Amino acid sequence: MKRRTFMSCLGCGAAATIATQTGLFPPVINSLQNAFALGEPSELSSMEARHYKKLPGGGIECGICPRHCQVTDLERGYCGSRENQGDVYRTLVYGKPCSLNVDPIEKKPFFHFYPGTQALSLATAGCNVNCKFCQNWEISQSRPEQTENIDLSPQAVVDLAVQRKTPNIAYTYSEPTIFYEYMYDIAEAGHKHDLRSVMVTGGYIEQEPLRLLIPHLDAIKVDLKSIREDYYKTIVNGELKPVLDRLVQMKSSGIWLEIVTLVVPTLNDTDAEFRDLARWVKVNLGADVPLHFSQFYPQYLLKNLPPTPQPTLEKAYAIARSEGMQYVYLGNLPGNPAESTYCPQCNAMLIERKGYRITQRNLVGNRCPKCQLEIPGRF
Amino acid sequence: MSKVVVVKYIGDQRNRPLTQSEYEMLLKAALHTLSGQGDLAAAVRRFLPGGTVGMKANCIAHRLNSTPLALADALMAILVSAGFKEKDIVVWERSNRELVSAGFTLNVSGAGRRCVGTDASVIGYSEDFYGSGEVNSLVSRILTEIVDVNVNMPVLKDHSVAGLSAGMKNMYGAINNPNKYHGNNCDPYCAHVNNLEPIKSKNRLTVIDAVRVQYNGGPGYAEDYLAYYNGLVISDDPVAADRIGLEILEHLRAINGQPTLERAGRPVRYLASAEKLGLGIADIKKIELRVIMIDRDGRESTGELLE
């Protein structure tokens, strides 16, 4: 099956389709469908990157993520979005989003962060890992000259969010760590207009850049792709340990945090792994951190695997709950009861969801209407 | 046994870039020797039987140290003399910008030789992924859909990660995600990139420009580390061609006071990996090497690789 046929069958260009269907605003880029319908390349950004050091004898070492790419002249880091130009490391994607849409915040997913609000969501090309299951590989695994980009300064993003009355700006779809400077400056400018910023990330970022970024963010969702190091090595092309360290750093900073694990059949779907993951989250981050298990759809380099069976996801749910996790959710299963939020004390329905839509909201402020338990999150 | 021909120009005392006619002399001599054919057209057809011919240039160092226009023109003239039509010859790279920066004139649909980057609106990458080992990439449609055979035309140079940048490394410019495959000194990734089906099946000839060699500080341009070798390395075995290129590179490094690539921390292991994949011969003892010296009048004599 050809790539385009495959994509149209699955309708997997989800990040783009909302914009297409609703005709939101010009210019909106339908990147997931157009990533390889190449036009003449626009100028790439030449803004100097942050968090790198020059090496004695030439070259630079990037410090934005644990990969610490050492990059010589005219070469790029693993992400493909940063280039050494005469031993000045430059981000090629600053102000050059390739995907821009308005999404429900539930799509990120955030279930305890201003439910029912919208997020102006953007991404640039590039990623610092290469997950074989990537749902957005057409932008994440591209170099910026291979995507259709527009010029949109941080202030222009903020202006757009204000104009569209979206209270949140989401850095998502690809890996925002690789467009760190752009994200940082948008988030900083957004706070001046009371716009919240949320980062949707794999968490593969260095400690210091994250420390400096967190004050400008309002929430982070981390894809904890597995609790096994070998999975990170073979399926993600990254490392688990730095991700776990950053999760602890995020939690201890006080920023709102939610976690998602994509459950991939045969690769990370054993009872033991579900249990280990839930235990790690509970012990290191707390039982009240929302934990989402999402259904995998065959994509990118794992087209040979089937979608995650619903019973497998329900097993993950049951195990995590039995381990004491209080807010466990199942994703990509529209209509499943595990999309909704329940009071962990009295089991009252607090927020009922159907897909990304909220169909019932019973929270009173941030409390359960029945037993008055305070529900963690930002409501 | 694989055969590699090195042709060196000894027409001048002074080192300088070669002209198109000088390149033509070198190419003709090399093609005759490599093919064993006395007739030039037959020699060409031995490797490039027909159809549309690609010429994959290497233009990362812009005009300063990229595939010379004179070399591309020389090969085109030879192909035309062998019966190919100009419009069936495509000089290509990953981007239009790089081609222009190296001095090429873009030409997608006009008369004459075509010249286009993969990023042009009419080109792009393959719809399907091609895989080998851990490498999974989209491949330039120039290679998958437009050309029938390809001549790989790199520049011999040092590479800050791979150690050697010659023919095999040049094919990183044919895939959509080269930045993902630079770990471990590009080993075994460089071998696997060259094992991707369109690259493996369509690359028929490697012509490495080793006239002026960036023996250190590559793949960009580093003025302090340039040396003239005044030669071309040509073979239908991509691994063997690179292996001989490596000998030249290490020689130029040694006589210019640079450590071996191994000691410099960038050992070239991907050639051995390529041999294991059956892409060609990396063991120099199994390579039949012919070195030809050519003077300004085109007279040929036998020479040594590292004299």
Image (cartoon, coloured by chain):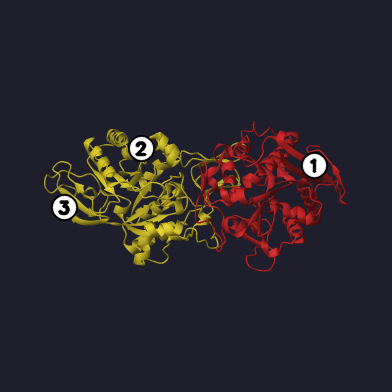
Q: Quadrant of residue A194?
A: bottom left
Q: CA distance from mark 3 to mark 1?
A: 84 Å
Residue B137, position as x, y percentages in the image: 52, 49
- Identify the colour of chain A in the image: yellow
- What residue does disc 2 label? A249
Identify which residue, A323 or A205, lies in the foreground. Answer: A323
Graded by Cα atoms within 10 Å as few (under 14), some (14 to 19) or many (20 or more), the crowding at tag 2 reads some
Q: Quadrant of the N terminus of chain B?
A: top right
Q: Amino acid at mark 3?
A: Asn
Can residue A205 be spotted in the picture?
no
Can residue A316 be spotted in the picture?
yes
Q: CA distance from mark 2 to mark 1?
A: 62 Å
- Identify the colour of chain B in the image: red
Residue A301, position as x, y percentages in the image: 44, 47
CB atoms at circles 2 and 1 under 8 Å apart?
no
Residue A136, position as x, y percentages in the image: 41, 52
Chain name for mark 1 = B
Chain name for mark 2 = A
Q: Residue at x 28, y 44 (%)?
A: A313
Residue B207, position as x, y percentages in the image: 71, 49
Q: First in sequence, mark 3 or 2: give its number.
A: 2
**Secondary structure beneath label 1:** strand
- What residue does disc 3 label? A362
Graded by Cα atoms within 10 Å as few (under 14), some (14 to 19) or many (20 or more), the crowding at tag 1 reads many
**Secondary structure beneath label 3:** loop
Q: Which residue is the extreme one toward the bottom?
A: B110
Identify which residue, B170 or A311, lies in the foreground. Answer: A311
Nearer to us: label 2 or label 1: 1
